[in-house]
Image: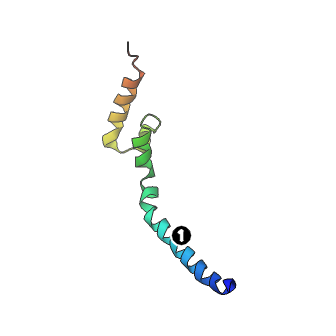
Amino acid sequence: MMKERVPEYHAVLSNLVQESDGRFEDFRHNAADFDLFAQPFTVSVDTVCDELQMELIENSKISLVPFP
């Protein structure tokens, strides 16, 4: 009885895998942007768009200034 249902379960699980891959494709595509947001001081300035490069440079200089 269980062996007859294996192809059915396989098809359902394969569809779930394909659906989750499709849903999370946007996250993989935007991984560099998420890294920039989550860890702005570890991102290489060369890897971000031109508009953000100066912001990163200025923020890195501010983070090096000791607070009293």
In the displayed image of the protein, which residue is found farthest to the top?
Answer: 68
Dot 1 corresponds to which residue?
Answer: 17
In the rendered image of this protein, does residue 51 appear above or below residue 1?
A: above
Q: Residue at x 42, y 22 (%)?
A: 64
In the displayed image of the protein, which residue is found farthest to the left?
Answer: 51
In what quadrant of the picture does the C terminus appear? top left
Q: Between 25 and 16, which is closer to the camera in this rendering? A: 16
Number of other residues with Cα within 10 Å of mark 1, as a class: few under 14, some 14 to 19, many 20 or more:
few
Colouring style: rainbow
Q: Between 59 and 20, which is closer to the camera in this rendering? A: 20
Q: Between 41 and 21, which is closer to the camera in this rendering? A: 21
The total number of labels drawn is 1
In the rendered image of this protein, does residue 15 appear above or below residue 63?
A: below
| Coordinates of residue 49 in the picture (x, y in percent) | 35, 45
In the rendered image of this protein, does residue 30 appear above or below residue 22?
A: above
Amino acid identity at mark 1 = Val
Quarter location, residue 23: bottom left
Q: Residue at x 59, y 79 (%)?
A: 9
**Mark 1: secondary structure:** helix
Quarter location, residue 7: bottom right
| Coordinates of residue 5 in the picture (x, y in percent) | 63, 84
Q: Residue at x 41, y 54 (%)?
A: 30
In what quadrant of the picture does the N terminus appear? bottom right
| Coordinates of residue 27 in the picture (x, y in percent) | 43, 56
Q: Residue at x 47, y 70 (%)?
A: 19
